[in-house]
Amino acid sequence: MQLGRRDFLRSWAALPVLIGKSARAESSEPLRVRASRHNRIYGAAVCTEQLLSDVEYRKVIGREAGILVAEGETKRNVLQPQRNVFNFSRTDAILKFAQDNDQLMRGHTLVWHRANPKWLNEEIVVTRDEKLLTGYIEAIVGRYRGQLNSWDVVNEAIEPDDGLVSGLRQQSIWFRALGESYIETAFHCARAADPDASLYYNEANLEGDVAWSERRRRATLKLLERLISKNVPIDALGIQGHLKAYRVKYSDEVFSRFLDDVASLGLRILITEFDVADAGGPEDRVQRDADVASLTHRYLDVAFSKPSVIGCLTWGITDKYSWLSRDEHYRWPDGQSSRGLPFDQEFKRKPMWDAMVSAYDKTPI
Ligand code: XIL
């Protein structure tokens, strides 16, 4: 198994940990420090526009995150809007910010059934030209070779509801054009383009204590087993971790067992897109914040009890810009903001932040 050169930050093991009730004071140590002291990473998804325009946001991201990922700017519709037009400027801006702030950066995502440019959606199903897959990976991974520590090579290839025995997403343009082999082709191509980057398969809805989530876990494990048995260069599983506090039942036991199953395949694990949707919860915000924090604590406690889990990135950092407030599946019908990230609208640390710090601090060194 090959790990990215920067997957682990140096240990801060010798420093004393001071947490108590006042852990949340803005002056106390940021998440990135708490995480790295325990040989784990903390990071966040960011948007270029906000990094460039919102000073307060920039400050919080620079202070708290040890690794960045672009929420949208490294998706194909942004990077290759036309067949012969690449646009790297937004990704470059994030990368520069990360380098200036001594942060790592990961890429998300090379191959997905969503966020593709229109020209590609039209062309691929007609031509079935594998070059439309490999040419892109070579161009993008090659351009950032040595600068991104990891890539989500393939995202969300599983959808048992599509009806295939394998549980693969039949409706994906990639599956329709190339069949299952698109997955291994993508990994081989990414490895060749940057041999040092860690390569991830990234998947959603893997922790629910419900039958449809169990089907997703089973299909994901089978896919990973197939890839490994064919010597496909895959290093890690990315578990998105978009929890729905009041809508999808979560169980520590189920999550724990799944993490063990993945680790037994020899793969590392990263929680790549953590947040907690609070839609459907009580009116009382204090209660909701407490519920979100408590679920965060349970989830990360289980995750960080496993040596295979290297860390967690939240999908955004402040409720001010959370996709949960925008997305039609998650947003509150009355238009109020979701409260599923560690910082509130005013960039103040919330109980969720305390829960994350405490989970990192409890991690065995
Ligand atoms: C989301 C972004 O947060 C939104 O702004 C965008 O409109 C849609 O995509 N799983 C993923 C992410 O892998 O890329 C998605 O990001 C959220 C779900």
Image (spheres, grey):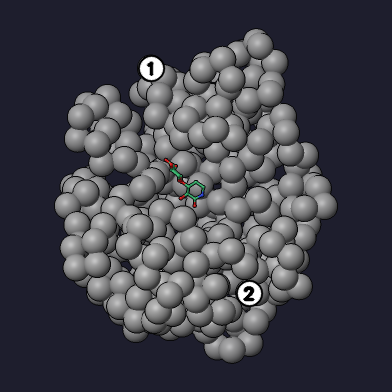
Label 1 sits on residue: 346
In the image, taking residue 354 as reference, residue 292 lies left or right, namely right
In the image, taking residue 116 as reference, residue 163 lies left or right, namely right
Q: Are marks 1 and 2 in contact (CB under 8 Å)?
A: no
For the residues labelled 1 and 2, the Cα–Cα distance comes to 41 Å
Quadrant containing the C terminus in the rendered view: bottom right
Question: If you read the primary sequence from the N terminus, does the residue marked by circle 1 or circle 2 appear first?
Answer: 2
Q: Residue at x 41, y 19 (%)?
A: 345
In the image, taking residue 41 as reference, residue 63 lies left or right, namely left
Image location (x, y in percent) of residue 360: 55, 43
Give the residue type that dot 2 points to: Leu
Q: Residue at x 78, y 57 (%)?
A: 214
Q: Closer to the observer: label 1 or label 2? A: 2
Q: Residue at x 54, y 43 (%)?
A: 274
Image location (x, y in percent) of residue 348: 42, 20
Image location (x, y in percent) of residue 265: 66, 76
Q: Between residues 267 and 122, which one lies in front from this camera angle?
A: 122
Give the residue type that dot 1 points to: Glu
Q: Between residues 36 and 267, which one lies in front from this camera angle?
A: 267
Q: Between residues 83 and 279, which one lies in front from this camera angle?
A: 83
Q: Residue at x 77, y 53 (%)?
A: 212
Whether residue 67 is visible = no
Residue 269, numbered label:
none
Instruction: From this view, report whether residue 228 is shown above or below residue 300.
Output: below
Label 2 sits on residue: 224
Instruction: From this view, report whether residue 196 is shown above or below residue 313.
Output: below
